[in-house]
Image (cartoon, rainbow, N blue to C red):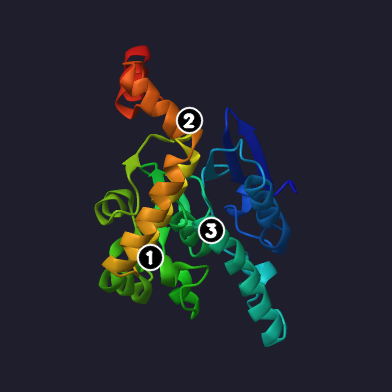
Amino acid sequence: METSEILFDVADGVGTLTFNRPAKFNALTLGMRDAGIPDTLTRIENDPEIRALILTGAGGNFCSGADVGYMGGNTPTMPEDQSAGLRRTLDWVYRLVNLDRPVIAAVDGVAFGGGFSVALTADIVLATPRAQFCQVFGRIGLIPDMGSAYLLPRVVGPRKAKELALTARTIYPDEAKELGIIQTIHEPEDLLPAACELAARLAKGSPTALAGAKQLMDRSISSSQAEMIEAEVAAQFKCRATEYHNDAVRRFAAKEPRLYDWDAMVKEAANSA
């Protein structure tokens, strides 16, 4: 379901989900949490023509996390209601992390608290020089939530994750890149075009292979080598049964252009620039 707070459009196989509360730094409301985001994810999950997803924010910021005015603070709510709300949020965070297609976050401005968590759900994060990341939860006496306690240590390592959580300090693009939180830095006007170009290239890959690669890499963090051997065999068997793989092999044998040639796509883009 698209609302004024969540915008979603699809072009050339790439979906773009935009947090759209620029006056509030795109802070998440109850409607975004309980309907806008999960309903959009359902649409993506049910549409195989959407081959990649971009997450971004309107008005020069990514997302400042939960809007405390909507989600808590001094609002008198029962503990069970608060727990249920967080569980609903964690449900779509889980779905984002495990989405069976590439997810790219295009981060401009603040990615604070839950906004940082949402950025961490992406497979690849692009940012601008004015991007800021912060596990801001500690500033208001909370622990990192919306998946950060799971996701952040897997990106930066447990010790660095603890330091970022305990200090609740702001991270700027150069450090974020050094830590592996972001991959590339772009000027604000170039951020979304760069994300769209990246997503369009990824959308040309085999959906089965891209999904399998994501799942295997994520699974490897908590699996034994023996478990990964079995998972790899199963995933490769599934890929070999696809028309995409068969056509790619046929093209290779016939010396035809590859179905998925990242280097060639990058070179073509550079030549046409």
Query: Of the residues tagged 1 and 2, which is closer to the observer?
Result: 2
Q: Amino acid at mark 2?
A: Ala
What residue is shown at x 44% (from left), y 26% (from top)? 247
- Disc 2: which residue: 200
Crowd band around label 3 with a 10 angstrom C-alpha radius: few (<14), some (14–19), many (20+): many
What residue is shown at x 33% (from left), y 53% (from top)? 172
- Disc 1: which residue: 152
Looking at marks 1 and 3 on the same chain, the residue that comes earlier in the sequence is marked by: 3
- What is the tally of numbered marks visible in this picture? 3
Looking at marks 2 and 3 on the same chain, the residue that comes earlier in the sequence is marked by: 3
Asked which secondary structure carries label 1, the reply is helix
Looking at marks 1 and 2 on the same chain, the residue that comes earlier in the sequence is marked by: 1
Q: Where's residue 236, x and y in %?
A: 39, 48
Q: Evaluate whether residue 54 shows in this view.
A: yes
Q: Where's residue 81, x and y in %?
A: 71, 81
User: In whole angstroms, how far apart are the C-alphas of marks 2 and 3?
Assistant: 27 Å
Query: Of the residues tagged 2 and 3, which is closer to the observer?
Result: 2
Say which quadrant the C terminus sits in. Answer: top left
User: In whole angstroms, how far apart are the C-alphas of marks 1 and 3?
Assistant: 17 Å
Q: Is residue 234 left or right of residue 74?
A: left
What residue is shown at x 44% (from left), y 76% (from top)? 138
Question: Is 154 or 159 nearer to us in this picture?
Answer: 154
Label disc, if present, on residue 64 of the rendered structure:
3
